[in-house]
Amino acid sequence: MEQHKLPNATLILVFGILSIVTCCCYGILGLIFGIVALVLANKATAIYQLNPENYTDYGNVKTGKILAIIGIVLSVLYLIMTIGMIAFFGFEDMQDPEMMRERMEELLG
């Protein structure tokens, strides 16, 4: 019996990696890549579980899913931190590096 590659296995892995790499882009890009990778991984896992002997590259799907979960967690944490900084310092102060430095000095003593 001929084995086929799981659909989107490589894409899931790439999106999982991108979710971690881009988690520092205010958390938004990493969140998008992570969620898309997770949805695709769940679909690929469902296909694989119907006929595991027919498909290869399940390792890429599992790895991509784990990376996507890590990327989502990091992105959510970064997003929460960004929202907290905007709430604490204000958006105007965050855009001015000198003002941000002064506010941090005040905060840290």
Image: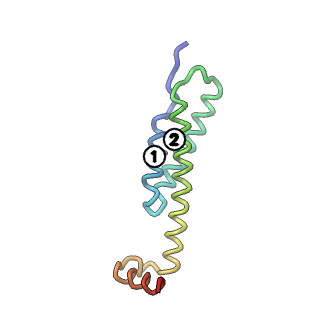
Residue 22 drawn above or below residue 79:
above
Label 1: which residue? 17
Secondary structure beneath dot 1 equals: helix
Residue at the location (44% across, 81% down)? 104
Residue 34 drawn above or below residue 45:
below
Q: How crowded is mark 1: few (under 14 residues within 10 Å), some or many (20 or more)?
A: many
Check contact, mark 1 vs mark 2: CB within 8 A: yes
Residue at the location (59% across, 36% down)? 43
Can you give x and y, in whole percent of width and height, for residue 9 in the image? 50, 34
Give the label on residue 100, or none. none
Residue 38 drawn above or below residue 50:
below
Residue nearest the viewer, comparing 95 with 81: 81
Q: Residues within 10 Å of mark 2 (few under 14, many from 20)?
A: many
Residue nearest the viewer, comparing 63 with 27: 63
In which quadrant of the rendered image does the N terminus lie?
top right
N-term mark: 1 or 2: 1
Q: What residue type is labelled 1?
A: Ile
Can you give x and y, in whole percent of width and height, for residue 107 in the image? 48, 84
Residue at the location (54% across, 54% down)? 72
Secondary structure beneath dot 2 equals: helix
Label 2: which residue? 64
* Residue that extends furthest to the top in the rendered view of this protein: 1
Image coloring type: rainbow
Q: What residue type is labelled 2?
A: Gly
Can you give x and y, in whole percent of width and height, for residue 61 in the image? 53, 36
* Residue that extends furthest to the front in the rendered view of this protein: 109
Residue nearest the viewer, comparing 30 with 108: 108
Residue at the location (56% across, 49% down)? 69
Residue 34 drawn above or below residue 99:
above
Q: In this view, does 47 lie to the left or right of 102?
A: right
Q: How far apart are marks 1 and 2 (CA)?
A: 7 Å
